[in-house]
Image (cartoon, rainbow, N blue to C red):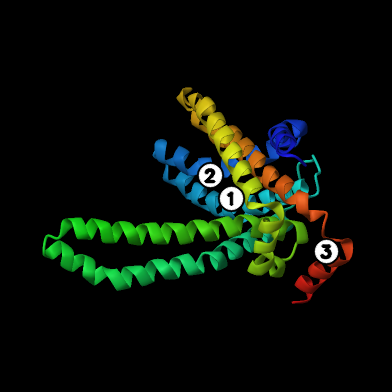
Amino acid sequence: MDLKKLVTSSFKYPFRNIKRLPIICLLFILIAIIPIGMISDNSYVTAIGVIAFFLFILLVPGYFLSIVKLGSNQSAMLPSFNLVNNIYDSIRVMFLRIVYMIIPAFVFFLALTAFGSTSREMLYNLRIPEFIVTVGLVLVLVLIIYLIFEFLLFFAKARLAYFNSLKEALNIKKVIGDIRSIGIVNIIKWLIIMAVLLNVVTFATSFVISIPYVGFLIYVCVVIPIIESIANYSLGLLYSNIARNYDDAELIESQTNDLLQ
């Protein structure tokens, strides 16, 4: 699928499934309860909101993984809500993120340990320029490593969705292979175009928040779910360009191995 069609299909996606769109909107109501409770100064509503927030964490990542999967198969349907599957997928997505963030976290704490005492000494001796340069270089290093693994995580998630296998998603070598197959240039172009368009949509719809009483609720429960649906479906469509290279036998084998482990 060429980039133009990919982007166009992504933005049309939520509106092709108007009947199922309320499913996502209802899920996002869960994270709106805490602010409502805080604004109304109602401790009971806030407590319910905390519980709802944890439900949100357990349901929404898995639901969006289903959208990535449908995109990777070039299906235009919104997934139906499935409590057990959504929770299971959310746990896998969270585990995947934890694993991929181990190295960035390790580098951060290593840098903190290595340069912490040196930085304090520079401050104590008023060597401000050296302190700024040192801290700046460390932050840049940590940021670069974080972005690299966030980038890998992006396609590990697509791999998890397509193969329905955590083992496949944790195989960094294959994830890198997928990135090479799609093409770094193609990915960068896709990232730039989607980032620009999604930010334009975000900015254009931000006025909704100014609507008295219901503006925040509309933005959280309608605008954000639509944007997230577009982004996740777009990732799936991008992955679909190489997904066809995997034959059914390999797909079944990876899913079977994941279930047996």
Disc 2 packing (10 Å; few <14; some 14–19; many ≥20):
many
Above or below — where is 29 with respect to 162? Answer: above
What residue is rendered at 58% in x and 33% in y? 197
Left or right: 250 in relation to 64: right
Point out which mark residue 225 bears.
Answer: none
What residue is rendered at 77% in x and 53% in y? 242
Amino acid on which disc 3 is placed: Leu
Q: Who comes first in sequence, dot 3 or dot 2?
A: 2
Left or right: 90 in relation to 126: right
In which quarter of the view is residue 220 placed?
A: top right
Q: Disc 3 on helix, strand or loop? A: helix
Q: Disc 2 on helix, strand or loop? A: helix
The spot of residue 91 in percent (x, y) is 63, 62
Query: Which residue is tagged 2?
Result: 31
The spot of residue 142 in percent (x, y) is 41, 61
Amino acid on which disc 2 is placed: Ile
The spot of residue 35 in percent (x, y) is 45, 40
What residue is rendered at 38% in x and 57% in y? 140
Query: Which residue is tagged 1?
Result: 56
